[in-house]
Image: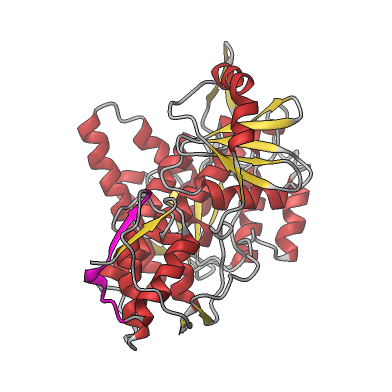
Amino acid sequence: MPEVVLTSETDWTGWRTATRSLVLAGVEPAAVVWTVGGSPSGFPRSSGSFAVSRSLVTLAEQAIQAREPERFGVLYSLVWRAHAGEPVLDHPDDPDMRLARRLALAVRADAHRMRTHLRFLPMGDRLLGWYAPTHYVLEANAQCIARRFPAEPFSVITPDASAHWDGSTLRFGAGLARAVDDDTLRAWWEAHEAAILADSRAGTSVPEAEVLDEAPRPLDEPAIDPVVFPIAVAPALTAARREAERCERCSLCGPATQTVFGEGPANAAILFVGEQPGDQEDIIGRPFVGPAGQLLDQALEAAGIDRRGIYITNAVKHFKYEPRGKRRIHVSPSPEEIAACGVWLDAERACLRPKLLVLMGASAARAVLGRPVAVMRERGQAMRLGDGQMAFVTVHPSYLLRVPDGEARERDYRAFVRDLSTARDLADRL
């Protein structure tokens, strides 16, 4: 039985080379054993190439980064079947395709979470960060970070591996298996920096995060330059964003760190509306990146919604809080503050023209519907707005964080995922 031994969990080049040879040699998927590390027993090697849909190649590029032992064989099976003429991409309910798409979605969501929540500490000549991703997304994300900040040397440490950028070369080395606080991370880096950098290797075959290419290409042809999924770039919305940065329509602009405007693609079919930015959103300047945002990401993934494809914002763009020692405690905005900030939400709606607005919580519902809303009574209802858009009410993810009982929290989380799935289906029908 042919055995393919890949050099790492993200050995895209090794998997692609083996897949090409095995398909050309006529080796059926059930006859192949895929492993990582160790000594190979050998497999048929054939020269030549063949073409499959670029959509399938992109799917494989993403799904191969999932922490799922079956992924190599499942992806090989899809390529084998596609080469035989089977339109696998046209069968979303096929078990292999369903698993591959679920893994690709999980990888994209995890890559997004990592870039959103990764924090850097200054360490001499570089920035140092630590993060524990769910999947093997370090290599793809490190390329993305290096391209966006080419002049900023950095090191990112994860439990699986580490990435190091010196301004010209991206290298990968050993990771740190345990979670650490900032002081422990600094001490560990000072003690091990020289050895880690000396043992690191240059290069990776994993494509950069968020590759969005669709045209056909041969399986052995290198990937084209990646395209980063953009935030909304409609000129009118860009102007509104800049004007909102100077907003003084209510008193919340004083204590808040900055205005936190919405983000997402300009052609998003669904607009998610929350209440207001929280402590971390106020510092970072992006919506839904704190604990509630992480829970929302998880629920979106479970509902089959790609966060990169939605626009997400808040009814109020400044963080309202009260100081309590060193902490800043969230305070719900007043109806007057919601109304004062409505001009920015109106601008987002007018520029984006989404099919559906998902209103998460009472403040978001009030901002759009113009009246007090009992969320639990109107939850799950779709309603037509005056401008023709549809609205759908559900709970805010922070509500789930406040449920004290574990069993009740899990039940409420499943209900939230069902709400998001319903909203997804509703938007698909509109």
Residue 352 visible, this angle: yes
Indicate the quadrant where residue 277 lies: top right
Query: Residue 367 location, x and y as percent?
Result: 53, 48
Residue 412 falls left or right of residue 245 = left
Query: Magenta stretch?
Result: 26-37
The foreground one among 72 and 25 is 25
In the displayed image of the protein, which residue is found farthest to the top?
A: 325
| Front-most of residues 88 and 289 | 88
Horizontal side of residue 150 vs 104, given as left or right: right
In the image, 365 versus 115, the foreground residue is 115
Q: Position of residue 333 (x, y in %)?
A: 55, 34
The foreground one among 332 and 286 is 286
Residue 36 in percent (x, y) is at 36, 51
Quadrant containing the N terminus in the rendered view: bottom left
Residue in the image at 73% along x and 38% along y: 153
323 is higher (above) or lower (below) than 308: above
- In the rendered image, residue 204, in percent from the top left (x then y), is placed at 57, 54
| Residue drawn 64% across the image and 58% down it | 231
Work out whether 11 lies above or below 142: below
Q: Is residue 89 visible?
A: no
241 relative position to 197: left or right: right
Q: Disc count in the image?
A: 0
Colour setting: secondary structure
Is residue 307 within the magenta segment?
A: no
Q: Residue at 26% x, 47% y: name it.
A: 414
Q: For the point 31% across and 86% down, which residue is it?
A: 86
**What is the quadrant of the C terminus in the image?**
bottom left
